Amino acid sequence: MDFINRALPGTNKGKRLRLFEIGAIPSLLEIARLPRHWDARRGRSAGDSGNSNLWDHSDSEAAAPPSSWYTLPNRSLLCMPLPVDVGRCTCIIVKEPSLEGLDGGSLYSLFTNEGRGRQDRKLAVAHHRRQKGRSVFDIAKNAKGLSSGGSDESFLGTVTANFMGSKYHIWDQGTPIDSLMKQSKRLLAVVAFVPTVTTCTGSYRSLRAWIPKHHSMQLKSSAQFQHINGLPKDWEVKKDKTQQLFSRNPHYNRFLRSYELDFREKAKAELKIQRSTKNFQLTLEENGRQTILQLGKVGKSKYVMEYRYPLTGYQAFCICLASVDSKLCCTV
């Protein structure tokens, strides 16, 4: 490996400072010890020959610290509520061309966002299609699960919508209930979009979501696992069995003359959130402060998703799919 190796003023002849050329950026201590004629822009002393450049190798910079969820296997991230001690999990949703054998439609892939220099994990894929004018999403861990028609163990479940796109039902993969292999599917969440809210300054979307209420709302350790029950058939009546999530109302930007959500924390990160009517933030209480799930557009066909307990990765992914889907009930 090439490196710069020279003695510094005031040091013993045998004592040298080595700065690795590939991807290394000197620390403040090292910079303070460099000769005054050191050219930081070129990564060498003035007058030295050579084309070494310490600053043009950003791809080789030190990797980001491990994510708080990196020890959790994919199945736990997808099918279990995110433990409280993990905090929040950040993922990326990418819209891709449909695969062969899936009869057209669109494909959405869900990846973890592990940070710079770390390998992201592919958690799930979703295939969107139209059935009698209604949206249907099939979700699986991989393409094999999508093409299996729901028979493969990697198949996770489906999301179904009404004709107007105002209500979405999120189902699991189902479990056999008799010898004829009839499936009993659990309803894991319901998402409802209210008609576009119109004000004198413009319009914005609003949504609500309902998920099963867990027996313990304090799943504190990532070593614990909790079985997820589905919503009861009369979930709209049994309020004690459901947990409602509320969308945060956007604020009006007078300079841009549009509504937008506050993604202040994400704005500081490498991901730049773009304005989009499909962006949303959900809280456990109306006008709540802590965001449980948020979706922000970061590219033409790319979104960042961030979720917390009590949601599972599967529930969070499906709620986001409902938001990015085109719908007749919303005019924006």
Image (cartoon, rainbow, N blue to C red):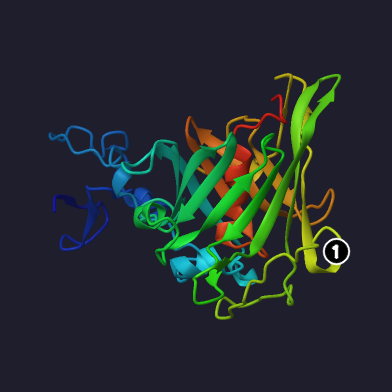
Q: Relative to 198, does residue 325 appear above or below in the rendering?
A: below
Give left or right: position of 283 versus 145. right
Q: Return the residue found at the far front.
A: 180
Q: Nearer the viewer, residue 64 or 208?
A: 208
Q: Position of residue 269 (x, y in %)?
A: 54, 44
Q: Position of residue 314 (x, y in %)?
A: 56, 58
Q: Relative to 180, does residue 63 appear above or below in the rendering?
A: above
Q: Circle 1 sits on which residue?
A: 239
Q: Position of residue 283 (x, y in %)?
A: 75, 53
Give left or right: position of 10 versus 134. left
Query: What's under tag 1, amino acid-wise?
Result: Lys
Q: Give residue 187's quadrant in the image.
A: bottom right
Q: Relative to 27, does residue 303 appear above or below in the rendering?
A: above
Q: Give residue 230's quadrant in the image.
A: bottom right
Give left or right: position of 175 versus 319. left
Q: Position of residue 99 (x, y in %)?
A: 34, 42
At 63% from the left and 65% from the top, the residue drawn is 186
| Residue 268 in view | no
At 62% from the left and 29% from the top, the residue drawn is 275
Query: The N terminus is located in which quarter?
Result: bottom left
